[in-house]
Amino acid sequence: MNARRGLKSWLVTTMSENAAVDRLNALVSKLVAAIRPPPNVSVSEWATQNRVLSPEASAEQGRWRNSRTPYLVEIMDAFSDPRIHHIVVVASSQVGKSEFENNVIGRTIDVDPGSILFIHPQMTDAKEYSKLRIAPMIRDCPTLRAKVAEKKSRDSGNTILQKSYPGGILTMCGSTEAHALASKPIRYVLGDERDRWAVSAGTEGDPWELAMARQTTFYNAKAVEVSTPTIKGHSAIAKSYVKGTMERWVSQCPHCKGFHELRWEDIRYEYDTIETHGEKTYKVKDVWYLCPECACISDEVTMKRAPAHWQAENPAAYENGIRSFWLNSFVSQWAAWKDTVLKYLNALGDTKKMQVVYNTRLGLLWEDRGDVQDEDTMLGRREEYPAELPDGVLVLTAGVDTQDDRMEYEIVGFGHFGETWGIEKGIIMGRPDSDEVWQQLDELITPAIAPEEAILLECITTMVTNLLFALGGDSAPDGWDYAAMERAIDAEIDVLIAACQRCPARVVLVTNEGGMGIVPENRLARHFRDIAGRVNQRLAAVADDVWLVVSGIGVKIK
């Protein structure tokens, strides 16, 4: 009996000691895990390995693929770069900026945990984002589902606006919530749609500055600002952008091999106008990219598959730990160029709609010129001009719009402070391809030109391009009679030269030198280059002066 009691006592003691050792080991493991450096996994690598796109939140559900958004890779990896503490992303819609934020949050929870403050314009935006994007991401990513507390009760640490996980809490709020922005320390601050934020969080001041102040105790803090651009001069994200590296995504032209950003001003398109019951609708027939360097055209598929990279305008900001990026929808796999052009056409004449197109599609700041007044208001602001020109007019411009059966012109006066006066408006009936119509326009405009003035025509290369496609019509370029087309273009150049020689003022013609690169790979581009080159030769032969401008430096040729 005594032996059995002794054995029992020894077993109890041993079991108790083992339990204490297990608890100690568990505690030590947690301490080691807390001080262990995070795994060397970038955000883009983590996304490839772990991210699953949810059906209710993504256009393409399934495993994350960096190849679908190559422009996001460097943006994502800037977050996991220890030298970078502030990232600014200015982006159009449909480029994946929300998925960038989601990947940053997912990698933070899984790899390098810390408390995250995710700020939205309004509290309703925060709740909607949590329900439609954060919750599905956690549900569909096994690594996140295993770490984020399950929503079982109010005490679970998982609510709509808060998600707890080992090492931190994800808190979502609106920009007006001063108590959330100014309370406890936060390592990671993310700001979504910065340009829609409140000017002040209640009476506490600038919401972004309040949020940034919560990071002062962290040597490894990170801040991310994301937004579509809005109004020029009032855009918070644009002001943040110029403090960073100011990077643009540039794509390689397949013809000249130069790298350029795909910009709206380099997009060319053809469309039909359909008028039904007084309402206009549009059908976009085709869209091209016109290279600003070689003036060769490329289609959408070619340019979206072309080699591309980020190009920094202010690389010195990297030393300050700030990288900034600007994206438009022309690089997106989910925003077709035809759709963008159609949205632009449908917005013509409506400033509010056009601002949306500029911001969300073209990735451009909107220059606010005030609300357009209704017709009666504008008529009521008319003034009698007692003189031939009103006082204050410094510059006169003449704009001409060519239609199938007429040319409509308007002469506008501009003042020192941006004032404008409508001087004259009229219509010259007749086909624009007839000499008589151009002669009438010439007689109308030329007498008003003083010898000390100047006329700038920009650009000859674009004119040749437009003439080629006008002469080609709807037929395929491979079947064009380029010899006949060049004869027609030469006739237009004859008219231009004659008009320049009659003009009493100095005329400056701007053109592109297209013969310095490699021989283009397709028939259209080769003929275009040859025709444009011979046009340049003709103009240079009759010009008084010929200048070649390289990198902003003028070299006199003649």
Image (spheres, rainbow, N blue to C red):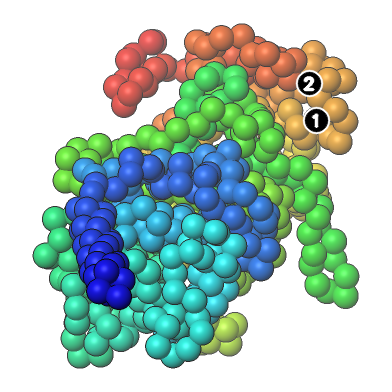
Which percent across, then down, holds residue 244? Answer: 26, 48
Which residue was labeled with disc 1?
471
Residue 83 located left or right of residue 447: left
Residue 167's quadrant in the figure? bottom left
Which percent across, then down, holds residue 253? Answer: 56, 26
Which percent across, then down, holds residue 412? Answer: 48, 59
Q: Tally the numbered discs.
A: 2
Location of residue 332 with respect to 22 vertically, above or below: above
Location of residue 538 with respect to 128 vertically, above or below: above
Residue 473 visible somewhere in the drawing? yes
Q: Residue at x 33, y 44 (%)?
A: 39
Decide: few, some or many residues near mark 1? Use Cα within 10 Å; few <14, some 14-19, many ≥20.
some
Viewer-closest of 373 and 387: 373
Location of residue 163 with respect to 144 vertically, above or below: below
Residue 182 located left or right of residue 290: left
Amino acid on which the number 2 mark rests in the picture: Met
Decide: few, some or many residues near mark 2? Use Cα within 10 Å; few <14, some 14-19, many ≥20.
some
Q: CA distance from mark 2 to mark 1?
A: 7 Å
Locate the C terminus by quadrant: top left
Tag 2–tag 1 contact (CB < 8 Å): yes
Helix, strand or loop under label 1? helix
Residue 408 visible somewhere in the drawing? no
Helix, strand or loop under label 2? helix
Residue 445 tag number:
none
Location of residue 100 with respect to 417 vertically, above or below: above
Viewer-closest of 440 and 328: 328
Residue 479's quadrant in the figure? top right
- Residue extending farthest to the front is 1
Amino acid on which the number 1 mark rests in the picture: Leu
Residue 485 tag number:
2
